[in-house]
Amino acid sequence: MRTRTTGNDDHILARFYGKSSHFTDIPGTLYHDYNVKKGLRNEDGTGVRIGLTRISDVLGYSADEEGNVIPVEGELLYRGYSIRDMVRNRKGNFGYEEVCFLLLFGYLPSPAEFEDFKSCLSSRYDLPGGFLVSELLRDPGKNLMNQLQTATLKLYNYDGNPEDSDTYETFRKGFNLIAKFPSIGCYAYQAMQHFYNHNSLVIHYPKKEYSIAENILYMLREDGKFTEREANLLDAVLVIHADHGGGNNSTFTNVVIGSTGTDLYSAISGSIGSLKGPKHGGANINVAHMMSEVLECIDYSATDDEIREIVRRILNKDFFDRSGLVYGFGHAVYTISDPRAEILRSLSETLAAEKNCSEQFHFYHRFEDIVREMIHEKTKKPVPVNVDFYSGFVYKLLGIPDELYTPLFAIARVVGWVAHNIENKLYDGRIMRPATKYVGEAQDFVTMENR
């Protein structure tokens, strides 16, 4: 029996791939001819509505009587409450926990209810016995999103009845994941640093009295210390990342997978895989890397003209990744402003001043203004700075390593995934089954000896 050494036959696969024309023979005009919504988008770029929700709403444009899109200031609503009000009215560093309650149950908790909720959450901070050593420390990974995804699937084995997809059971399992994701993310990072970079292994067990934001900083830092303002800023980041409507890719992925009746661990794992992508949650890493390369060419004291020249090069595909994209700008829904970015811009300015980093903040703000001006000159349309631009700057101020930028997004967003999964089970229940239009040709089969 003949065998091949793994990898030595890649040239054969490449030859087959190169001969195939079936990957590129669907003309774009066919999408219009058959009224197929490419990328689940309408021809004006707006998203195709695929469901109803009462969990959150993303407002970025309106439409006139003829259906033309009209840009408006952006707004994000959680159960009808403005995200700005949720951030502004937080008590201490438990704003994220209050948002979790709101998204899951649909109303703001009373003081007594909130204390009970926080107690239930903190009692689930700890990982199952043996999980830390067996699943994280003994099997570190190079990518923390992959580790978070793998750990989610492994938690299936620690659930006494993992296949039960009843709505209450879905909530109970999801609530458990919300509590444990911070520890998994932080421990996966520590394991990676220890195994691949030979750094000392630092493991701090979460404190019951700490909020999720406080515990993340505590578990990440060797000395476990943080300031009140640092924890408050990270709490705000978690609040604004908790949900973003039912149409964003990772939430839609969760609902699609969940609609099959599969277990929640599989659905959440799918969402993590979606969020990892650079066109979704992974965009914050692209921003960080882009700005790092920008600052290798010009420093924080650069003139506006020097910034314009760098931006011109980016737009002309002559700088960074040559994509022509200025990462951190533009959004699928928001047209004029992204409320999440505005919140982070304001809060980061205060922390930057406290850390003697005001020069860096003002550089980011100038860069934002110049990019928006130049893109508007080119397209004649407004372009908002989005949440990814300032979230990377915030993480940098907090000393959070870039490997954790996207995992922190997942740690915050898991509550939204759980809430939408439950809502879909309650009010729809059917398997999601969109349709495609076949545009290939019918062919007569040719036997092997006649080919």
Image (cartoon, helix red, strand yellow):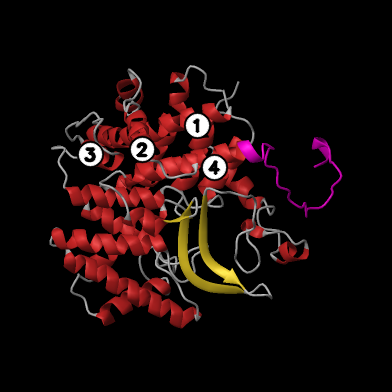
423 over 135 or under it: above or below: below
Asked whether residue 390 appears in the rendered view, the answer is yes
Rendered image: mark on residue 114? 2
- Tell me if residue 244 comes above or below residue 219 in the rendering: below
Residue 4 at least partly seen: no
Residue 287, given in percent of the width and then of the height, sits at 35, 60
Residue 15 located within the stretch drawn in magenta: no
Q: Position of residue 296 (x, y in %)?
A: 23, 65
Numbered mark located on residue 420 in the image: 4
Which residue is under mark 3? 220
Q: Nearer the viewer, mark 4 or mark 3?
A: 4
Secondary structure mostly taken by the magenta-highlighted segment of the chain: loop
Q: CA distance from mark 1 to mark 2?
A: 17 Å
Local secondary structure at mark 2: helix
- Spatial CA distance of label 3 from label 1 is 28 Å
> What separation in Å lies between label 4 and label 1 (alpha carbons)?
11 Å
